[in-house]
Amino acid sequence: MTNRDVAKLLRNVAAALTLKKASIFQIRAYETAADAIEHLTSEVKDLWEEGKLAEVPGVGKNLSEHLNELFSTGKVAHFESLTKDLPPVFFEALDIPGVGPKTAQRILSLKVQNLEELKQRLEDGSLIKEGFSEKLAENILLGLKDTNSEKDRMLLPFAEELAAKILDYLRKSPDVKQADCLGSLRRKVATIGDLDFAVASDNPEKAIKYFVKMPGISRIVDQGENKAMVMLTSHLQIDLLVGKPKNYGNLLQHFTGSKHHNISLRKLAEDKGYSISEYGVKKLKTAVIECKTEEEVYSLLDMQTPPSEIREDAGEIEAALKHQLPQLIPYGSLKGDLHLHSSYPIEPSHDLGRDSMEDMVKRALALGYKYLGFSDHSPATSNHSKPKIIDILKKRSAFIDKLKLKYAGKIEILAGLEADIQPDGSISVPDEGLKLLDYCIVGVHSAHRMEQSKMTARILKALSNPYVQILAHPTGRLLNQRPSFEADWAKVFEFCAKKGKILEINSFPDRLDLRDDLVRQAISKGVKLVIDSDAHGLEQMDQLDYGVAVARRGWATSADIINTYGFKDLLDVLK
């Protein structure tokens, strides 16, 4: 069971106790424990296995015994005795944002059998005739819409764009001294669920009140002394935690995660005689040490501060203890982009870019690039003969040569191409055409469903072409749409390292491919990478830092990424 599952179970018990008019203190005890468990970055079941349930705020002796029974047998006899007389629709209704036990009981009293019937009777007005207020009916319908709306995880670039607006709003409050995103967004994971934020404030109540007045909120789901949960009009849940400045570093470290990083960090702290939580670091028989910054937290444990992107318990704690963390590639350090699609009339196999080459050159200059390369999709083989393809590429190269002369001394321009890897591993452009280029990118754009061995052979055959330098979006994934295809990546990496082939980290929002785990494997084998935008328009040219985030999660340094190099060194690699 996940923390969310356990929290839901405890809230169901609290709701049942409410109906049975139990002690308010008993009800609050379950609600408090549910809140604490839901916000743990460690799994409560892991803590149970480690014998550490007592460390969870709000979990006393009785509840510890119940949780022990739950994790041992999968059920709790006491909980079942409390809830057995209540039909499923009562608990289903509690999942609707804003519906509490009393409203759920009222729904039950009107003999509603399920949520579909509830929705129908609210929409046809029959429940209003039976005493529901119009406002309550409207809120429940909105809550049902939130509950049932599809919840694909957000792509990192879109999550960051929304988070930037929320942080900008929070930082305008005089009661907010610092504001940060938390969780998977702060760690730059490729896809994000709900958005979580933290602020440091000496006036938590005022900070919370300011937050819940933020534009775009459809409803306030929960508002407490130091936390709040709201639903945006887009049905996205936003959580805010408020901490005091004196221990904000503890809160920020704890809720950045990841779960596995925090479990290992807690074990390390225990070995050194400390206990560590979002409230502070405590040494046996001493007061809690509150940390204003994360650096203070890690420093107490005699270690470097791991960058948030690599806090996944994948060796970063061991490296930090040895003071051997890599110098990850900095954001904003790329000198150019080699994967750009222009509107040049190349009659491509796939989509044409929207803007002219010259406009993209001007945009590259505005972005401070030292070089750029045009890699439009190759001419379609379905309606072009090999001689025609070569003729189109000759004219295009001549056009790019004129741009090179026009912008000489201002920016370096390269003539590249993105060619298709055919199902048999051949390239969609004849070698005579590839010879006209400064470099060639190849990518799988069709027949993604292949056996691993066949896909591996296909990729290696394409990369064996002496005129091919770069493999684009290597795994072929489209986030929330299509998973990575299967290939023997160890074999691909070994080949690339031996032959000097480059793998791309594609920064396009729905790709972010090569994946971060494969980035780390690739660089461990000595493979060089390039971070590209795959921009098909001017507005997409500034998304390279999303690829940098992937590279950082894969422990890449500037030396691993060829477009951090100067132009002459770049050309040496592309030869």
Image: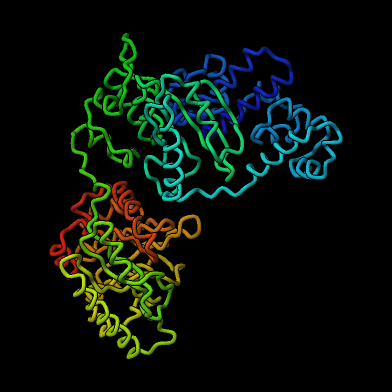
The answer to whether residue 528 is visible is no
For residue 70, what is the image quadrant?
A: top right
Position of the C terminus by quadrant = bottom left
Q: Residue 571, relative to residue 232: is it above or below? A: below
Horizontal side, residue 380 vs residue 209: left or right: left
In this view, 419 is above or below 164: below
Q: Position of residue 95 (x, y in %)?
A: 65, 35
Counting from the top left corner in percent of width and height, residue 269 is at 30, 23
Give whichever of 153, 405 is nearer the camera: 405
Q: Position of residue 502 (x, y in %)?
A: 25, 64
Is residue 297 positioned above or below 92 on the image? Answer: above
Counting the numbered discs, the total is: 0
Judged left or right of residue 33, residue 183 is: left
Q: Quadrant of residue 544?
A: bottom left
Location of the N terminus (image quadrant): top right
In the displayed structure image, the side of residue 179 where residue 150 appears, left or right: right
Q: What residue is drawn where x is 34% and y is 56%?
A: 542
**Frontmost residue, 371 versus 446:** 371
Drawn side of residue 499 relative to residue 441, left or right: left
Determine if residue 560 is in view: yes
Q: Nearer the viewer, residue 312 or 278?
A: 278
Taking the view exactly as shown, the residue that stands out farthest to the top is: 285
Q: Residue at x 74, y 18 (%)?
A: 20
Dividing the picture into quadrants, the one containing residue 573 is bottom left
Q: Position of residue 148 (x, y in %)?
A: 65, 45
